[in-house]
Amino acid sequence: MAKVRVLFVCQQCGHKVAKWLGKCPECNEFNTLVEEVQKLDEGIRRPLLSEERPMSIAEVQPVDRPRVPVGLPELDRVLGGGIVIGSVCLIGGDPGIGKSTLILQLCEKVARQGRRVLYVSSEESIMQTKLRADRLGVGAPELYLVSETNLDMIRRYLEEMRPALAVIDSIQMIYRPEIPSAPGSVGQVRECAADLTFVAKRHGVSLFIVGHVTKEGAIAGPRTLEHLVDAVFYFEGDRFQSFRVLRGVKNRFGSTNEIGIFEMLSNGLREVPNPSELFMSQDRIGRQGSVVVPSFVGSRTLLVEMQALTTRAAYGMPARRVTGVDLNRVAILIAVLERRCGLGLGGQDVFVNAVGGVQVEEPAADLGVAVAIASSFRGKAVDAKAFVLGEVGLSGEVRGVTQAQARIVEGRRLGFERAVVPADNTRGLEAPEGLTVVPVRNLREALDELQ
């Protein structure tokens, strides 16, 4: 009879303890320890990546890691220019958001280039995957389907076929026979992902792993799963709306500032050619508490509409609620507006929203947020043909921002006629034809220009 031992593993950080505790001693999260049974006489066997001996870094010859362009510009941008051969990527998202649709369209694009692709479906049968593929128009001859949950069989398929791209959809249903815990447990998810990563890197297979998310929005399983792979992406959006955003939170081969924007249609995902239209309302004339801000996301500029609403606090403590912007920055801007501009916001509930679900984290949006709050409080609409940019300091000054030229060019391209910018950015700034640049030095000047 095999000897076993019982450990408790944290679902967040992967820390192991000998007995159950209410709080993980490593990450201090409550109720994250789950039971895991391990056999003592059967060690975890993984293949060796190589048998090379240590060598001096000066003797190491650089290896060119070519990228495979997918053919979907939005996806290629988030990946950093294409799929790196031998890389392992993890994609997470809410159920029904479109992860499998995105992955299947990715497989179709790569297979149409004559590269062999293996799609391992652990949650659907081959017939179910085929029905979805027919709806999406996917049918490349080099795309192979298999429905399997046994890790040993999947590893054998990868070693025999040596595909250019392999997809595991999803990792929560894969199990390793020698581990007694059920599929989806911390031990199974961690060990299966680790084994697949070793196989992919040894044979130069580009691997995409689809993972479920918890109710908090994090990818299910220990945090070591995210540390194990080369890139982590989140597919976000509202299931009741058609737009989806692919966002990178880790990428060893590219920037994590890029986002890809898609629209869910009946025949699959379609790229959004002009993302600024998604984040900006077309009818803004006479609308109070609304202002457009050019936000620099990755390598492109997006025009984002900032909305604010102020109302008298009816329950004592004023509420501060934000979506898409930093709550701490909004709190600072409210204090600056009250102290430097004389707006009585202390007894007002303040709500701020970045339209379209985009996350605006850069300080260049400070002026736009402040102007939107002042517009709602004063009951005066902002000029619908103007957009603003600038960082606001604690003394009310408006500081310069980076990439000011690219921001005003994008604003003019979408039909805006005025740009309120920091005075520090006017040096060397070339205004496009038809656009008037208005320099401001402090927040009070900006409010006077726009309202």
Image: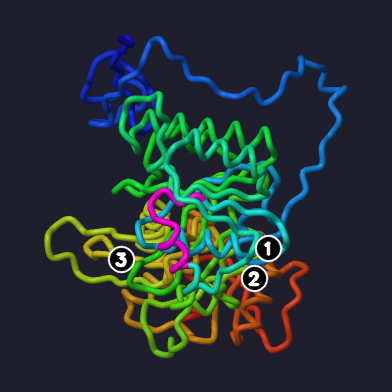
Task: Verify CB contact (< 8 Å) between mark 2 and mark 1.
Answer: yes
Q: What residue did someone put label 1 on?
A: 403
Residue 426 location (% of width, % of height): 70, 69
**Label at residue 149:** none
Q: Which residue is at the far left? A: 315
State the SS at label 1. Answer: loop
Near mark 3 (Cα within 10 A), the count class, few <14, some 14-19 or many ≥20, is some
> Which quadrant would residue 8 be assigned to in this image?
top left
Separation of marks 2 and 1 at Cα, in angstroms? 6 Å
Query: Was residue 126 drawn as part of the magenta stretch in this picture?
Result: yes
**Label at residue 351:** 3
**In the picture, which quadrant includes the C terminus?**
bottom left
Give me the residue at 37% from left, 59% from top. Answer: 339
Q: What residue did someone put label 2 on?
A: 407
Separation of marks 1 and 3 at Cα, in angstroms? 28 Å
Left or right: where 197 falls relative to 332: right
Residue 398 location (% of width, % of height): 55, 62
State the SS at label 2. Answer: helix
The magenta stretch spans which residues?
120-132
Can residue 342 be seen at all in this image of the molecule?
Answer: no
Left or right: where 248 falls relative to 79: left
Q: Amino acid at mark 2?
A: Arg
**Figure check: 378 above or below 117:** below
